Amino acid sequence: KDWQKYPYPFIYGQFDPAQMPVAGWRECSMQALSTVEVRGWAGDLIDGDDTLLIEQIQTRLLGRRGVWAAPDEILVTVGAQHALFLLATLLVGTATTVGVEDPGYPDARNIFASRTPSVVALPLDADGLALSAGLDACEYVYVTPSHQCPTNVTMPLERRAALLDWAERRDRVLIEDDYEIELGFEGRAQPALKSLDRTGRVLYVSSLSKTLAPGIRLGYIVASRELIRELRALRRLMLRHPAANNERSVGLFLAMGYHDALLRRLKRTYAERAPAVATALAKHLPDVVFRTVAGASSFWLRFPDGVDTRALAAVAERHGVLIEPGDVFFATDRPLRNYARLGFASIATERIEPGLAALAAAYAHITATHAAGR
């Protein structure tokens, strides 16, 4: 769908054009097109990456997360999804068992399922991924500890330490997808799982999709230099390397401080929008269960039993409201259908209250229809 045509796009993973620092991005793009810069990126890098971008990832992005990596331990990817596909292609065979969160990121689950039939759905609790019996069957475990997808739960330090201890004792590997953590607007962020790793048990994946713009498609993997060497060779067979002019523009955007300024702006915006969503939900949809998570750009909603959020989404769309049904996040063949994800990154603050009033009208319609059909 062209979500920008809808008045109330409560969708996740898109961006608000009003937040995009167009002038800064234009300046960096123009500088990347200067004669001096063009000489650096216009040639075929074969399997290399832009040195400025690697330096900025190493010092600015990873530094904030407490992760230290040498340049040859970093690989640039075309987004986090590409990073997961590379890891799955290299490491996962038909006999490999991979654990994924349930509910969890559906594309990660589908990527691993394309490589092996043995994908184990691992349950969550109030602290994120639970240390359940199912873990022991898994050779690799995909986890989103900073903001669990889609519940937004942040895994506490004690659970992170316990998960790492399990991986070390059982000789297992964790694939950490560290996204959206830089947007926390209350308190200090929990350290990345990778920053606590002392024995090479964590493969680290992140991207700029949730901060700069999803359309730029830039992510990265941090792992041992030996594994990065193999991943680099595999990436070369797929696409040689990401667009070098794009890498240089992003490197300049980071180096010139525009990304830091954007993060501050997004934090202020989300700190304004999140309570507006919470207030409007409590007012218009009082029987919907949710909790506010500082720094997340969405809410995970639980409607009463019997509500089908796919039916709700269809009716809401006719009211100009876009929401994301939650059944796709569940790994089971019979997913829970009364959940939905409500994003607020792409909707202006002043549209939140009327948008949720419109969603409440759609909800009233389907509940009345359901009651009449009994």
Image (tube, grey):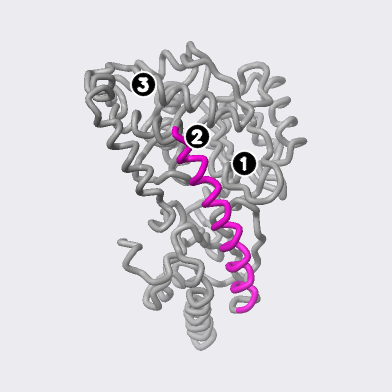
Q: Amino acid at mark 1?
A: Ser
Name the residue tied to disc 1: 146
**Magenta residue check for 281:** yes
Residue neighbourhood size for the residue with mark 3, other residues' Cα within 10 Å, grouped as few (<14), some (14–19), many (≥20): many
Q: Which label's residue is closer to the chain start, 3 or 2?
A: 3
The residue sitting at the right extreme is: 158
Is 249 rendered above or below residue 268? above
> Residue 35 location in percent, x, y?
22, 25
Considering the numbered disc 3 on the image, is that residue within a helix, a strand or a loop? loop
Give the residues drawn in magenta, as a range. Answer: 256-283
**Number of marks in the rendered image:** 3
> Residue 16 location in percent, x, y?
42, 57
Name the residue tied to disc 3: 49
Residue at the spot 27% in from the left edge and 26% down from the top edge: 239
Is 331 rendered above or below residue 300? above
**Mark 2 and mark 3 in contact (Cβ < 8 Å)?**
no
